[in-house]
Image (spheres, rainbow, N blue to C red):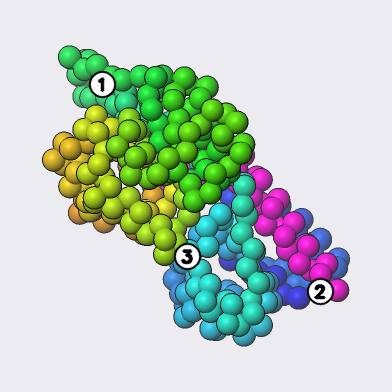
Amino acid sequence: MRIVCVEPLGISQEHFEELKKEMASKGHVFEYYMDRNEDTEILASRMGEADIAVISNIPLPAAVLSRCPSLQYLSVAFTGLDHIDMDFCREHHITVQNAAGYSTTAVSELAVGLMLDVLRRITSLDAATRQGQGRGAFLGRELRGKTVGVVGTGAIGTATIRLLLAFGCKVIAYNRSRHAEVEKMGVEYTDLDSLMKQSDIVTLHVPLNAETHHLISRERIAMMKPTAILVNTARGNVVDIPALAETLSNHCIAGAGIDVYEKEPPLPSGHPLLAAPNCVCVPHIGYASREAFDIRADIVFDHVRQYLDTIR
């Protein structure tokens, strides 16, 4: 089998060489690339002869997949699969497996970090301090005692709930189905509209699909308290981003912490959130911690090993 890792995945070349030796000892060819390149021609060239490919969140459309006639298996070093043409994969019997769970801690910690940043204006006050300014009349707000609405109580949402409870927050939640583990923590499930109206902070932890596209619509953003903040570490298009930017600019809510967008950063200079007041924007770093990347590498190549075992 020809196995191709099309990007570095945060792995050292020495680690890749060890994997190459391991795969060669089992009769397989292993290729890897130490640069990340999203160009479709380059991707097609790298993957064109692969039986198995490893990739993270680089967009993988049919234009690339159709040029990989031998491809049988994709080990995806990412939680979501919305960047891959799954219809093509299903039609051509390409097995796709994600790396669920590797970034649970990393994303949940960032979500809480964004809440603290927006409440205390850490980023903007850092800039002000560097410009020779003092506190002035600024007063921040504490996380303790806030009602936080968690939208999506899968692994990351549940991990975020644990952190919020440790901070002394009241947590309410919305999910398609109720989870006993969450209810045992004293969290009350409610409908989404009620959550939007009651919460001091809304934090999003749902996948992107047809049901969740613009789940946080203009109408639902308008339901939020004027003192509330929105945090999104899920997927950009779960939120109506132009509506959020307009709402922030009109000071109809108090702020936002955003890690995800319609497309992967870098963002264009005219992106509406970049000019929105009290909006902390980071370039999709929720999953990107040293610890998470080490876990991810173990998961994706264990998946490859397991797949190879099934086809002996």
User: How far is disc 3 from disc 1 in space, using C-alphas?
Assistant: 40 Å
Visible in this render: residue 50? no
Residue at horizontal 16%, vertical 36%? 251
Residue ID for mark 2: 311
The amino acid type found where label 3 is placed reads His
Q: Earlier in the sequence, mark 3 or mark 2?
A: 3
Residue highlighted by disc 3? 83
Residue at 78% across / 62% down in the picture? 305
Q: Is residue 101 left or right of residue 42?
A: right
Please tell me which of labels 1 and 2 falls first in the chain.
Answer: 1
**Which quadrant of the view contains residue 55?**
bottom right
Which residue is the site of mark 1? 129
Q: Position of residue 142 (x, y in %)?
A: 35, 19
Residue 186 coordinates in the image, percent (x, y): 54, 28
Is 62 magenta? The answer is no
Q: Which residues are magenta?
A: 284-312
Mark 1 vs mark 2, foreground winner is 2
Q: Secondary structure at mark 1?
A: helix
